[in-house]
Amino acid sequence: MDVRKGLIVTMMAALVFSSGGLAVALAEPAPAASPVSALQLLAQAQSEAALGHNDTAKQILIQAATLYPGDMGIQKLLGDVQYRLENYTAAATAYQTVLAHNPNDKEVHNRLGGVYAALDRYDDAIAEFRKSLPLPAGFLNLVQVYDDEGRLGTLEDECNADLSRDPNNPIYHLNLGLILAYEKKLNRAQEEFQAALDLNPNFNDARNGLGTVYGDMGRSQDAIAQYRIVINSDPKYTYAWMNWGVELIEQGKYDEATDKINQALVLDPNFAQSYNNLGVVYDYRGQFTQAVEMYEKALHIDPRLREAYENLGNIYFTHNLLNLAEAAFIKGLAVAPRYADLHFDLGVVYEQQQKYDLAAEQYRAALANQPNLSVARDMLAGVQAKIGQHE
């Protein structure tokens, strides 16, 4: 497994559906009839969801929503749980209820955008992610949806137009940098993040982005230096802790990496990417059971986390569990049908199973979505030769 291929660095807040509803409920007026009962039901549901008992949590929340229809903390957590159960239409209904109560809840617009993306309602997803701006998570999710639709160039053009109108706006430089980093245009991304920092040296999102670019360039120590600056400025900046852990994994410092990633999980216990990265640590250490547990935990929190499907499939493949590997890659492609790495990995499984026609189909799909993926071109040529031998 390619180290950086399986790891996730987070340029900004990614789409994470947390169980943070209790804090919301405490901050809002509870129903006058029996506020303690509403809070107890919500806390009980949170506990069940944290244990992975989403069906139980759902039943508690449905009951709570019936008793306390005006409690938006209950509705928000119900949306989160329905999302985790892949009941996307029900999740959308819960989030729409929250937005009817508070149309300016940008975090819920972001979550609803993720639900619409899961339903392949891309225009609706884009609309919701735009409504979540300037929430950092919203823009990064917008990038991914545009990429899934093959329209990332359109979004890049919009960002360039924004910069032409207002070249001194650090947010516009950040946004363009995020797109360029996503496209692996690393030198240009570095320039945009640095331009944002020149305009605002305290812009932690831009500095964290610069760190991720340095990491992708192989400049691990420079990346860590950026994360240190961010954490010194804001010790609760979750993504810098996790990204620091990623760089330590690259260096083979697994204990230190685990400490940093666990610090990210202390700050956000529902950070799916952190569980994925812990899975990579266990994987590298040869701890199969623990690695699978972490990948599955990541997918329990965010069932659309494509990198976790990829890592899960790869560890099954490494242990010659080909049917399980195939299932993981196919499930990932159901979530992200344009993700070239998953097509390539599924092609490798099919080739190992001597299903050469299916392997060729997957290598072609990988190249259709990533034409410069030379390894897929080489594998396709090899499998075509095998097909010719069997005709």
Image (tube, rainbow, N blue to C red):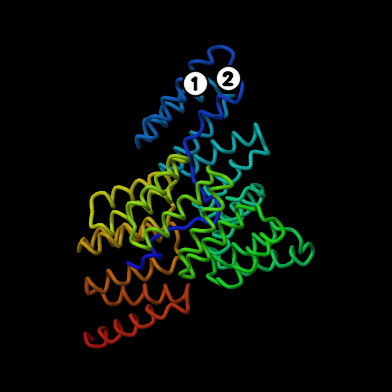
309 relative position to 93: left or right: left
Give me the disc on residue 168. none
The residue sitting at 30% across, 62% down in the picture is 314
The percent position of residue 182, horizontal first and vertical second, equals: 54, 65
Q: Amino acid at mark 2?
A: Ala
Q: Which residue is mark 2?
A: 30
The residue sitting at 58% across, 73% down in the picture is 187
Can you name the residue that lies furthest to the right here? 165
Q: Are marks 1 and 2 in contact (CB under 8 Å)?
A: yes
The residue sitting at 45% across, 39% down in the picture is 82
Q: Nearer the viewer, residue 155 or 363?
A: 155
332 relative position to 170: left or right: left
Q: Amino acid at mark 1?
A: Leu
The residue sitting at 72% across, 59% down in the picture is 199
Say if 107 sits above or below 320 in the image: above
Q: Which of the image's four quarters has the C terminus?
A: bottom left
Q: Which residue is mark 1?
A: 39
Q: CA distance from mark 1 to mark 2?
A: 8 Å
